[in-house]
Amino acid sequence: MCAEIKDNKLVNINFMKILTDNWKGNKNTTDTIEVFDFNIVLELFEKLNQKERTQLILETDDSYLLVGGGLDLYILSIVVGEDEEFYDLINAKESDNEDEVSIVTGGQLGSFPKKMIQNKKNVIEALKYYFEKQKPNPELSWDN
């Protein structure tokens, strides 16, 4: 977070560091940028495809949000502090059955409970709220 003077008032401006993976075969480079504009976050999120781009991390001084996947199959988690609090975005309509879905995140194929799989709409809502408030959106369902 940083501040700017606007109309002789000190105004907070949100900014975050964003890390994205960029796979070429079995080699990854991590792209890191600082953003002040949520539209850039959306643009980078839209590039997730479970192939070259499999993960996006929004990072603040004391927490981070991780989105993995792509192609309308996502997982999203928020970690606060040094692994002090964990929040996984869940689909409350799904039961705790043993069905799993395979998603590539961090360049690795993993199996995740169907309850953790998110659509684009929910992920965008969680991203926007986190970008603005640096915490989980209380209107969404979280497991912590």
Image (cartoon, rainbow, N blue to C red):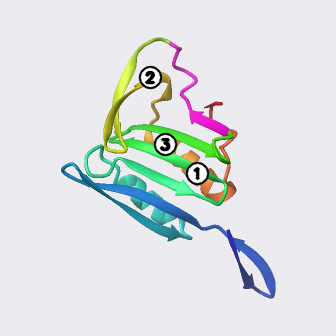
Kind of residue indicated by mark 2 = Lys
Badge 1 crowding class, 10 Å Cα cut-off, few under 14, some 14 to 19, many 20 or more, is many
Q: Earlier in the sequence, mark 2 or mark 3?
A: 2
Secondary structure found at label 1: strand
Q: Are marks 2 and 3 in contact (CB under 8 Å)?
A: no
Percent coordinates x, y for residue 132 in the rendering: 65, 58
The residue under label 3 is which amino acid type?
A: Lys
Q: Earlier in the sequence, mark 1 or mark 2?
A: 1
In the rendered image, the residue lying farthest to the left is: 25
Q: Quadrant of residue 138?
A: top right
* 102 left or right, relative to 129: left
Looking at the picture, how far across and down is residue 28, in whole percent?
29, 55
Q: Pick whichever of labels 1 and 3 is earlier in the sequence.
A: 1
Task: Choose mark 1 or mark 2, whichever is in front.
Answer: 1
Q: Nearer the viewer, residue 75 or 122?
A: 75
- Check if residue 87 falls in the magenta segment: yes
- Tag 1 and tag 2, C-beta contact below 8 Å: no
| Residue for point 58% across, 54% down | 128
Residue sitting at x 41%, y 61%: 43
Q: Is residue 45 left or right of residue 71?
A: right
Read off the residue under disc 3: 121
Residue drawn at x 46%, y 68% as measured from the top left: 33
Depth check: give the residue in front, 128 or 29.
29
Where residue 39 appears, as percent x and y from the top left, is 49, 64
Q: Of discs 2 and 3, which sits in the foreground?
A: 2
Q: Few, some or many C-alpha atoms within 10 Å of disc 2 (few <14, some 14-19, many ≥20)?
A: some
Q: Where does label 2 land, which residue?
A: 114
**What residue is disc 1 on?**
64
Q: Which residues are magenta?
A: 85-96
The quadrant of the image that shows the C terminus is top right
What type is the residue that disc 1 sits on? Tyr
Q: CA distance from mark 2 to mark 3?
A: 17 Å
